[in-house]
Amino acid sequence: SIKFAMFMLAEYVNMVTVSAVSVTLFLGGWRAPYPVSTFWEGANQGWWPMLWFVLKVQLLLFFFIWLRGTLPRVR
């Protein structure tokens, strides 16, 4: 039903929002990771910051979905 679909969509939207906020607050946001930014000067210019941000958000989403799939649901 459409109610169930909207419920599941809201859950995934919440995971994306939490991942984006966590990346911004704790993982440096749109800045390149530390080892990369030391030897590559252009890592934080142009389109690269958006790529770093999306990559970090996707990494956290993968971690959330992986945990959700492997851990049993507690009732």
Image (cartoon, rainbow, N blue to C red):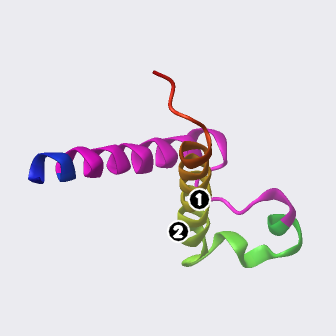
Q: Which mark is residue 12?
A: none
Residue 44 painted magenta: no
Name the residue beneath numbered marker 1: 30
Position in image of residue 66 (x %, y %): 60, 51
Residue extent of the magenta highlight: 6-35
At horizontal 57% and vertical 78% (from top left) the residue drawn is 46
Q: Is residue 31 left or right of residue 10?
A: right
Label 2 Cα crowd, 10 Å radius (few <14 / some 14-19 / many 20+): some
* Quarter holding residue 36: bottom right
Residue 73, relative to residue 70: is it above or below? Answer: above
* Residue 2 falls left or right of residue 35: left
Residue 53 to residue 29: above or below: below
Residue nearest the viewer, comparing 24 with 63: 63
Label 2 sits on what residue type? Met
Callouts 2 and 1 close, C-beta under 8 Å: yes
Q: Residue at x 82, y 57 (%)?
A: 34
Q: Residue 16: where, in percent of width, then height?
A: 42, 51
Q: Is residue 54 above or below residue 69?
A: below
Q: Residue furthest top?
A: 75
Q: Which residue is mark 2?
A: 50
As measured in the structure, the alpha-carbon distance from the residue carrying label 2 to the one carrying label 1 is 6 Å
